[in-house]
Image (cartoon, helix red, strand yellow):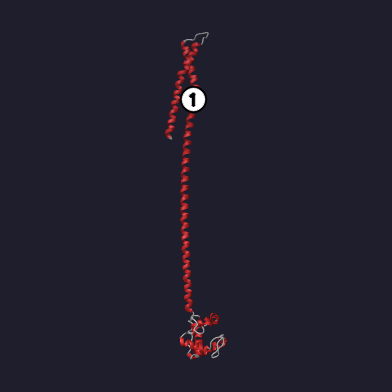
Amino acid sequence: MKKRILTLGILSILLITSCKKETAKSEPKAETEEITTAVPDEQPSVAEQAAETQDSVVTETSTETPIKVADAKKEVVKAVEDVKNQAVNKAVQQSETVTKKVENTTTKETEKATKVVESVTEKTSTVKETAQKEIDNVTKEAEAVKKEISTPAAKAPKQLTQAEKITRGKTLFTTGICKNCHNQTKKLIGPTLVIIGSTYKKKKGRIANFLQGNAKPIVDPKRFKMMKPNIDDVTRHMPIQDLEALEAYIMSFAK
């Protein structure tokens, strides 16, 4: 930029010098022509004519030259201002370009960082949920173990003797629904206890299994349909100790 301003200054000086030379060459000639063509009443001498011509040239040159110099200065100032404005505009454009690049870079980096943070947050949340589930499972297992340890062991049922089983079975038979269809020796709706006990003894069956619904009928199978509701609704839900007691009582009538 400094070189350009210097060049413009040199050009303006050369322009001013050229203007002076052209003015000095052209103006006296025109004045001389005017003098030679004019027809005054009195012919001046050659010395007087030269003096007048010189004075005219100096006067005209001195009035026109400052105007041209001022114009040249204005051109130089305008050129300098144009150079400054161009430099300023270029600097502003470069600054705007750099600012945009910085903003774009910052935005991209921010978005990238945000995505990373979101990803880490999501993974952390998943890990927390998984860990919480594992903690809940372990807690439940620990509570179950604690409860099992703190709960006293259930007492095993007392093992009855054969006589005690028969007595217990008689009580269940006479106070339950069995007596409605069966009798010890008299046939009612169902077979007698003598027939039932003797049949199971002969075929080596288990009355307790039948009453649980786990064995087929071996005494009067054709009438089993009448017995089945009692098995489904009553005897299959009784404790095994009571069923074994009933079995002992019925088998006591076997022959």
Residue that label 1 marks? 68
Point 49% across, 21% down: residue: 62
How many labels, in total? 1
Q: Nearer the viewer, residue 190 or 64?
A: 190
Please state the horizontal and vertical placement of residue 235, each as a whole percent of the image.
Answer: 53, 82
Above or below, comparing residue 115 to residue 35 in the picture: below
Q: Nearer the viewer, residue 139 or 21?
A: 139
Above or below, comparing residue 123 to residue 171 in the picture: above
Please state the horizontal and vertical placement of residue 174, each as a whole percent of the image.
Answer: 56, 88
Please state the horizontal and vertical placement of residue 26, each as a whole percent of the image.
Answer: 46, 18
Point 48% across, 64% down: residue: 129
Q: Tag 1: residue type?
A: Lys
Please state the horizontal and vertical placement of residue 44, each as a whole percent of the image.
Answer: 49, 10
> Helix or strand or loop: what does disc 1 sit on?
helix
Q: Residue furthest left?
A: 3
| The N terminus, quarter of image | top left
Point 46% across, 50% down: residue: 108
